[in-house]
Amino acid sequence: MTTPTTMALTVKVQERTARITLTRPEVRNAFNDEVIQQLKAAFESVGARDDVRAVVLAAEGPAFCAGADLNWMRRMADYTRDENIADAGQLAAMLKAIYECPKPTIAAVQGDVFAGGMGLVAACDMAVSVRTATYCLSEVKLGLIPATISPYVIRAMGARAAHRYFLTAERFSAEEAHRIGFVHELVDADALETKVAELSAALVSASPAAVRACKRLVQDVAERTIDDALIAATVEGIADIRASDEGREGVASFLQKRKPAWLAG
């Protein structure tokens, strides 16, 4: 008999913003293979919806995400190398789905973030954190490395900070996470939703096509050598968006001092 899958998250859409909420506070929203599959499917689903222009990743309880679920880790302890590759591949695919979601994404961090949970925050376009949250890349304490999450975490905090926190596995404060650029905003707990709503409102009021193109632009340009190929790509990018329907409408509405069509309805 197959054990039915228990949903580990909820998805709600309101005012053109999708909210994906981790709902396993009893295990500090740690993830396992089922949670990974559900997160990947949720981001792919909302990313394809025309009525969604922004996505918020949130969580219930005192922790945002504590990384890998202990029961899942126990199962992994006996995996062969091939099984470990397949398993890590699922996590990598989920993180890529978040990072490449065509809609802008916001991590609403209401509590502690450990290990793999750092990858969830880093894969989002922006992050708002409560001041009381604690962060930690704890892998080396377990004889592991934060390999699968590293492309996103290093982009978010920079190589210099990654050298320290990958190697020491020390806990650091939300203030430090903000200082190194891992999170964008620090707020008191009672102000988290207000700040997230403020960012969401800014995202949904902009041209959907331009926002999608800007997200792609950052991913394409970041850390690339500024050579002729990159310059040509940026030239083509602005030309394409200017010539698009929404690009023309955005400029026209600005010049005509009216709201653009995408704000109608």
Image (spheres, rainbow, N blue to C red):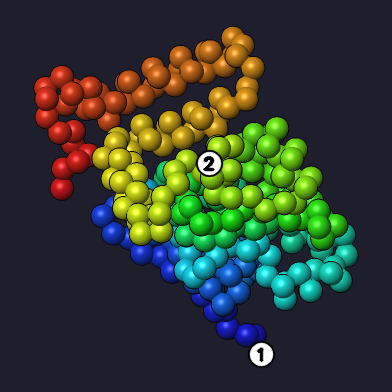
Between 151 and 252, the one lying in front of the other is 151
**Residue that protrudes farthest toward the top in the picture:** 228
Residue 182, position in %: x, y?
56, 42
- How packed is label 2: few (under 14 Cα within 10 Å), some, or many (20 or more)? some
Residue 192, position in %: x, y?
38, 55
Residue 48, position in %: x, y?
41, 51
Q: Residue at x 48, y 64 (%)?
A: 59
**Residue that protrudes farthest toward the bottom in the picture:** 1
Relative to 8, does residue 221 appear above or below in the rendering?
Answer: above
The residue wearing badge 1 is: 1
Q: Quadrant of residue 154?
A: top right
Between 147 and 174, the one lying in front of the other is 174
Relative to 234, does residue 85 appear above or below in the rendering?
Answer: below
Name which residue type carries label 2.
His
- How packed is label 1: few (under 14 Cα within 10 Å), some, or many (20 or more)? few
Quarter of the figure with the N terminus? bottom right
211 relative position to 130: left or right: left
The residue wearing badge 2 is: 178
- Helix, strand or loop at mark 1: loop
Q: Residue at x 31, y 53 (%)?
A: 194
Q: Does residue 97 appear in the picture of this structure? A: no
Relative to 84, does residue 71 appear above or below in the rendering?
Answer: below
- Helix, strand or loop at mark 2: helix
38 relative position to 215: left or right: right
Indicate which disc, 1 or 2, sits on the residue closer to the N terminus.
Answer: 1
Residue 53, position in %: x, y?
34, 47
Alpha carbon of mark 1 to alpha carbon of mark 2: how far? Answer: 48 Å
Q: Residue at x 79, y 74 (%)?
A: 74
Name which residue type carries label 1.
Met
CB within 8 Å, label 1 to label 2: no
